Amino acid sequence: MHESTLHAWREQFNEEGYLILKNFFDADIIQNARNALTQLVDQHAAKLLAAGQINSRMTDAPFDLRLLRLYQDHITEAPNIFRRELHLAGLFDIFFSPPLLDIAEAFLGDEIRLYPNYSVRPKLPDHAPTEVLWHQDGGYTPGEVKMLRMVNAWTPLVPARVENGCMQFIPRTHQLGPVPHEKREYYLEISPATLEPHLNQVIPVELDPGDVVLFHNLLFHRGLPNHSSQIRWSMDWRYQDATQSTLRKENGHLARSRSHPEQIVQNAAHWASLTFG
């Protein structure tokens, strides 16, 4: 990747707080991720079938409908996030994409970890636990969060639009530093007095499978409610300067390292052999 391109992207990220990269992942990488997550849905289908809660695994249902149909009569039991289950070979090429790590290295330096907060979210239609409120990701991290050198990444596995709950950003709000958050039923939310002066700057982040957005740990953002009839599947993860503490009990996994190359995640099989944290 040309140094001038990386420089321009770094400048945009630092100024606006985010960077959208269109058509970044090849279609086969996205399909491999969808196939991996289908394995998780298969496990839920088997559990529900064994419990007598369904009478079919619904294997013919589309990817963006199957989990919803499996739990349609038990919607409060439906998963709204996968995290510890994500050590699947089919997800390696997204989390450890060499071109994406090149960008992360240009932003963070050559010691990079996959931060222990990687997630897949099946945002169900009109499901309150999946409507993420205005927040800074740093609002969930205790301690000296402002000191963490980090790049957040998010990619959809189905088209993400306003109707089905795409993200919204408020550009340049990362420059405000950490701001007060208040506890709500499911999530933290930026305090109204802090948020309201910036609401006239909100932009939707509508992306397609293969697109990825990188954004600052302190950027104001939220996930809209899903008012469609399908599931909005997405992946989110973070790269961190591995010379820093995670400020968590988990250490994450090395993705790039010149000082400890023997400790990096080597390939898909290696990733699948590891555990969360």
Image: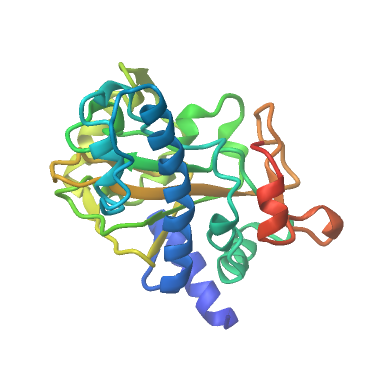
What residue is shown at x 42% (from left), y 64% (from top)? 31
Quadrant of the rendered image containing residue 129: top left
| Residue 1 percent across, percent down from the top left | 58, 80
Q: In which quarter of the image is the C terminus?
A: top right
Q: Is residue 182 above or below residue 38?
A: above
Q: Is residue 195 above or below residue 212?
A: above
**Tally of numbered discs:** 0
| Residue 57 percent across, percent down from the top left | 33, 40
What residue is shown at x 29% (from left), y 61% (from top)? 207
Colour scheme of the rendered structure: rainbow
Is 99 positioned to the left or the right of 215 in the image?
A: right
| Residue 194 percent across, percent down from the top left | 29, 29
Whether residue 268 can be seen here = yes
Whether residue 133 can be seen here = no
57 or 96, nearer to the observer? 57
Q: Is residue 266 above or below residue 51?
A: below
What residue is shown at x 48% (from left), y 67% (from top)? 29
| Residue 85 percent across, percent down from the top left | 55, 39
Is 168 positioned to the left or the right of 141 in the image?
A: left
What residue is shown at x 43% (from left), y 64% (from top)? 30
275 or 51, nearer to the observer? 51
Quadrant of the rendered image containing residue 173: top left
Q: In this view, does 164 lie above or below 22?
A: above
Quadrant of the rendered image containing residue 7: bottom right
